[in-house]
């Protein structure tokens, strides 16, 4: 999430874990997808609230196309977000969808 992205109460600020990757898109090239870990007390946070909040903070081409709520964001031992694992997970999903 961009700086200042926690100013509104709908998106909690303490310890919020978010990872964003680009998903391939024929028309746009890539579209941003966010993986969000909900915090205790904010279980009611919705995809629409996250998208709306981010839309007010970033340029149109950076607005989120997709939001997925996850139990955890993959991180290295040093605490860096492992976006490569998220991309791999999306590639596996795409392959499974093609197989169906």
Image (cartoon, grey):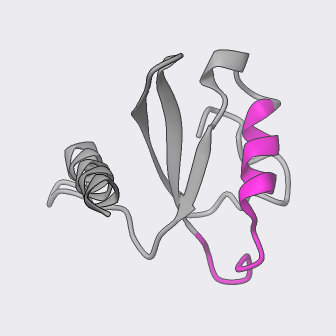
- Determine the residue positioned at 31% across, 58% down: 93
Q: Can residue 59 be seen in this view?
A: no
Q: Does residue 63 sit above or below 15 in this rendering?
A: above
Question: Depth check: 57 or 94 in front?
Answer: 94
Q: Is residue 39 visible?
A: yes
Q: Is residue 91 left or right of residue 28?
A: left
Query: Is residue 49 one of those drawn in magenta?
Result: yes
Q: Residue 82: image x %, image y %?
A: 24, 49
- Magenta residues, as a range? 38-55
Q: Residue 78: image x %, image y %?
A: 18, 54
Which quadrant would residue 65 be assigned to in this image? top right
Q: Is residue 90 left or right of residue 25?
A: left
Q: Residue 18: image x %, image y %?
A: 50, 53
Q: Does residue 22 sit above or below 37 in this rendering?
A: above
- Determine the residue positioned at 63% across, 32% down: 3
Which quadrant would residue 26 be assigned to in this image? top left
- Determine the residue positioned at 85% across, 50% down: 8
């Amino acid at each position: 999430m961009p700086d200042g992205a926690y100013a509104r109460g709908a998106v909690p600020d303490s310890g919020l874990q978010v990872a964003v990757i680009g998903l391939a898109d024929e028309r746009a090239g890539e579209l941003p997808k966010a993986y969000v870990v909900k915090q205790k007390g904010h279980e009611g946070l919705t995809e629409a609230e996250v998208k709306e909040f981010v839309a007010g903070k970033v340029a149109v081409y950076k607005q989120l196309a997709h939001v997925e709520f996850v139990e955890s964001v993959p991180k290295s031992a040093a605490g860096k977000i492992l976006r490569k694992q998220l991309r791999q997970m999306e590639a596996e999903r795409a392959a499974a969808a093609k197989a169906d």
